[in-house]
Amino acid sequence: MILFETINQTREFSVLKRKEGLSIGFVPTMGALHDGHISLVRKAREENDIVICSIFVNPIQFNNPDDLKKYPRTLEKDLQLLEEAGCDLVFNPSVDEMYPETVKKEYDFGDLANVMEGEFRPGHFNGVAIVVQKLFDITLPHRAYFGEKDYQQLQIIKALVRIENLDVEIRPCPISREKDGLARSSRNERLTPEMRRAVPYINLVLNEAKGMAQNHTAGDIIRFVKFKFSEHPLLKLEYFSIASGIDLQPVSGYASKGDMAFIAVFAGDIRLIDNIQLI
């Protein structure tokens, strides 16, 4: 497995592989890798000749400086996991390498970016779009792999591909979960033992919401979920939304096929998100 830290080296590698007629699968990450990330790498390995993974903690997608500062960084462990998973190249640039000048570009994703994560993390999706477009330009992938835990981000990236007319196939992959239902996240590493025991409650409540969807309105389910978290001593609900799985706009009345529930919860100062398809 090759490790590159510069844009030029990485792009030259991708250009060469494309000239050789080889397909490239790309998995962008911010490191602190877990089994969810590795499942994306394995999927890319199955479907492509070459697998490239990036490890870059992107500062411009963090609206909370403390969150950026505390984001776990485990490069040595990450590289070992990627080599074992069959990754061919890891791109691990510095911030200066990625952003030699101040970034001024602004995307307009309309209502897609104004709800849920967009409402509570202003500027987040613009930062995501900028770095993903830049990484695509560097790695030149045929296919790129994203987990559905960050479902709204996935929809934003699909919109980015349309806006920029990018020649890359976006490959969504199912949420990877621990045995107790907790969605795998790099932030889970920061949970105290007490918090770790508490957080499977998030997925438990999501599944209860799913069970209600056939015969309760969205308003009923939202009130139920808010009540469930108001009773919990360790977890604080930031938002719970029932929305279309296509345009992410809130659902009124009864959920229909493809509608989803989205949630963000604080366990202390650690913010966790999850989602589930209702019908």
Image (spheres, rainbow, N blue to C red):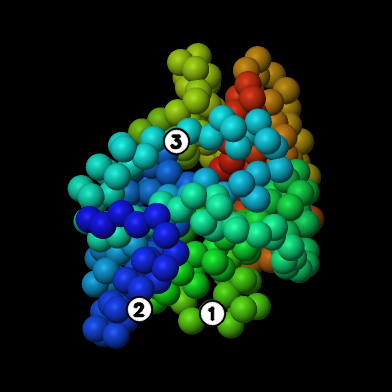
Give the mark nearest the N terminus, 2 or 1: 2
Residue 88 horizontal side relative to residue 235, left or right: left
Residue under pointer 2: 15
Disc 3 residue type?
Arg
Q: Residue at x 46, y 69 (%)?
A: 138
Residue under pointer 3: 73
Q: Residue at x 27, y 69 (%)?
A: 50
Residue 145 horizontal side relative to residue 262, left or right: left
Between 184 and 244, which is closer to the camera in this rendering?
Answer: 184
Badge 2: residue crowd in 10 Å (few <14, some 14–19, many ≥20): some
Disc 1 residue type?
Leu
Give the mark nearest the N terminus, 1 or 3: 3
Pair 2/3: label in front: 2
Disc 2 residue type?
Val
The quarter holding residue 230 reads: top right
Relative to 183, say whether 54 is above or below: below
Mark 2 to mark 3: distance in Å? 29 Å
Q: Are marks 2 and 1 in contact (CB under 8 Å)?
A: no
Residue 272 horizontal side relative to residue 238, left or right: left
- Quadrant where the N terminus sits is bottom left
Mark 1 to mark 3: distance in Å? 30 Å
Residue 250: x percent and y percent?
76, 56
